[in-house]
Image: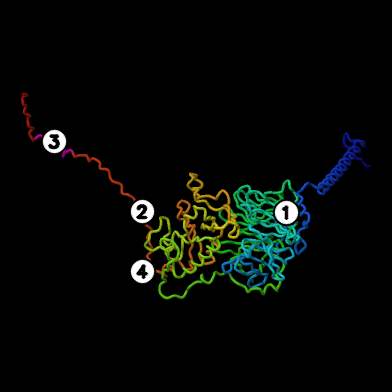
Amino acid sequence: MTSTAAPPKGSKPGTRLRVWAFRLFVFVAIILIGAIAWAGLGASDTTPTAIDPTVAALATAIAQPATPSATGELPQPFDSPQPTRVTIAGTVIFTSRLEGHSRLSAIAQGDPAPFQLTEGDFDDREPAISPDGRFVAFASTRSGGWDLHLLDLLTGDVRPLTQTSAFEGHPTWSPDGAWIAYESYDGNDLDIWILRVDGSEDPIQLTNAPSMDASPSWDPGGRRIAFVSDRDGLPEVYVALLDDPDERYRNLSQTPLIAEADPVFSPDGNAVAYSGRGNGLDFIYLAPLDPDLGGPREIGIGRDPEWAPRGDALGAVLASAHTRHFVVYPLVAAEGASLGFPPLAGIDDFAWTSGAVPSEVAGWAPAISPAVSAVAELVTSSTGRVSLVPLAGVQAPTAMLSDRVDEAFTEMRRRVASNSGWDVMATLENAFVGINAPMPPGYAFNDWLYTGRAIALDADLLGSGLLEVVREDHGAETYWRIYARTAIQDGTLGEPIRVRPWDFSTRYTGDPTTYDRGGSLKEELPQGYFVDLTEIAADFGFERIPAISNWRTFFPAARYNELARTDGLTWQQAMLEIYPAEAIVTPTPYRTPTSTPTITPRPTATPWWWRWILTATAMMVPTATPTWTPAP
């Protein structure tokens, strides 16, 4: 017998029909709402808004999709793909110091050594390669002050892009290759300007805030420019939205305790890499433009980042106290990395392109390694001890230096005077210091001033504003970069300072925090033009000396003004050049004697037997009876 299950209690055919009708109504409503929302979104995307007619029109004209990678897929640096082998290819055009000047050089994958692209008695730096790979825009002093120039890699021709009295530098190309954004120092602060490469239009000023706006980088899509600004305190990374005048500037990094620099867009336009200094170290950070992907993340140690052509790695400059190296950080999980480049030392900044430099250019100049001028070459052949040579025209307690370094000092002094417009080293706090001359308390017994191979700049220049020092920590040691203010402030000499100098005087304000730190950063950047005296000194072999560990509480121990040419010698070897071995005795650290406290005498208890003897003796002596004289 077949049994039929009874419907649930309270269930009727009409009720089931109404339930299914309600479900169908909800489904149709969801579809209609989604369609309306999609239509509204599309309409909002196409609705024009009121925008700046110049900058916005420029952004619209050059806007284009980002260049895809060679595989047809955009890199995803924030994901963790399956392990692959990373091959870093292309050509690196970089700046390095050669024969006392900044020059442009290039090296392609597989080249044994770099070759020079520019040469002359001037400085070239900050290369930027055009999207088609044919041109290099760069900053140069070949016309006097710092201006922008354009190098044609096919013909070798160089032509100026700007010819003004203001400082211009750090160019970056628009994705269509028709425009260049750059930084310009005019009106006592750095601002971002936009220039048409063919010179057919006047430059357009992008920023005009009373702050430092520098180091621009153009978005591959054409509608954004990243730059560094200190408008809210320490330098941070901002993104300028060229077609949005209402909310044009967006703070991307938002790290008030880290000073950022050198932002650069990724090839797909989805992220910005930049460097930041915090706790005395430079780190490379990567920040997505989509806030849903999180905030910036740390990549590695270095500065001046640059993307590999495929976007799967970041190159950077790894700086030490006395040199800089090229380093690469893969951004994807890799079984291995094939760089294809030899070690590059002394690199200052660089640009990376997927193409190769034309072979015609390679014959311009032979491969050259960084070197100093001839007068600074190491002297190795000598008999007997080295004599001390007087320094003509120099005022110092003992104006003498070792015969091994006096010529290098003279040429360094001339170069600094030529670049700054005044003789910075005509007066020195110290040159040679005799072995028996006492140094100020807190100095090391093996100071290089004893060797005749070091100088100390006049300390009064710092308080007068003619010198500025920037603190640079390398590992556990603190170094100082010295800038000298130029005598002429019209832009023909020097350049503006982009990093806040150190202020030693704030340690005396009564604030325990600044006292413990040995000072603080200055509240704002100094105005005007300066020359990097530390860089010029390094061209002639004079290196800065690290501060002694107690510099925070003892000002002379900072040694910010001391430069020494060691030539690879130890302190004892340098001393043996001018002293016989028996004259060099390692001094024992002198300890200031402490005063010996005077013992306060205390009464000693007299023994009872001695008191009895004294009492008995006194009784045995007769007491004289006084004689009374009657009054008259």
CB under 8 Å between discs 4 and 1: no
Q: Predominant secondary structure in magenta?
A: helix
Q: Amino acid at mark 2?
A: Thr
Q: In the rendered structure, which segment of residues is drawn in magenta? A: 608-619
Q: Amino acid at mark 4?
A: Glu
SS for tag 3?
A: helix
Whether residue 353 is situated above or below residue 360 in the rendered picture? above
Q: Left of 434 or right of it: where is 62?
A: right
The residue that label 3 is drawn on is: 615
Category of crowding for the residue at label 2, using alpha-carbon neighbours closer than 10 angstroms: few (below 14), some (14–19), many (at least 20): few
3 or 4: mark nearer the eye: 4
SS for tag 1?
A: strand
SS for tag 2?
A: loop
Residue 105 lies in the magenta stretch: no
The residue that label 4 is drawn on is: 582
Whether residue 385 is situated above or below residue 166 in the rendered picture? below
The residue that label 1 is drawn on is: 224
SS for tag 4?
A: helix
Q: Which of disc 4 and disc 2 is earlier in sequence?
A: 4
Q: In which quadrant is the C terminus drawn?
A: top left
Q: Which of disc 2 and disc 3 is earlier in sequence?
A: 2
Q: Amino acid at mark 1?
A: Arg
The residue that label 2 is drawn on is: 592
